[in-house]
Amino acid sequence: MSHIVIDKERCKGCYLCIEECPKKLLKVGKDVNSLGVHLVEFDDPNHECLGCAMCATRCPDMAITEVYKG
């Protein structure tokens, strides 16, 4: 089982990761960081994350870390 961690202060709200996720587990959230950016939210209630790290690879600011829990 995998999940991701988003560094709230590094996220600049480009939302490229949202487009990249094959399972569509990322969305624009309600929380705002110190830059005034609506943060990306990881929503995976059914544990569908593949651990592919496509979102992390696509993030230009390296604000996403993929974590695998076996």
Image (spheres, rainbow, N blue to C red):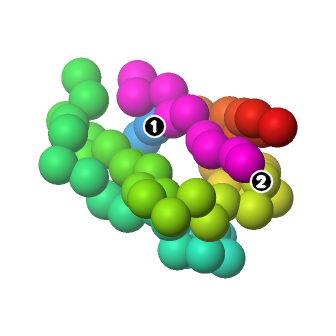
Left/right placement of residue 10 relative to residue 22 reads: left
Q: Position of residue 59 (x, y in %)?
A: 64, 49
Using a 10 Å C-alpha cutoff, classify the residue at mark 2 as few (fewer than 14 neighbours), some (14 to 19) or many (20 or more): some
Q: Is residue 47 left or right of residue 11?
A: right
Q: Position of residue 3 (x, y in %)?
A: 63, 44
Q: Nearer the viewer, mark 2 or mark 1?
A: 2
- Which numbered marker is on residue 51? 2
Is residue 6 within the magenta segment?
yes
What amino acid is labelled 1 in the image?
A: Cys
User: Where does the image place residue 45, in percent across and percent down from the top left?
Assistant: 43, 59
Q: Nearer the viewer, residue 31 or 50?
A: 50
Point 51% across, 35% down: residue: 6
Closest to the observer: 20 or 46? 46
Classify mark 1: helix, strand or loop. Answer: loop
Residue interval drawn in magenta: 1-10
- Residue in the image at 45% along x and 37% along y: 11
Name the residue carrying label 1.
11
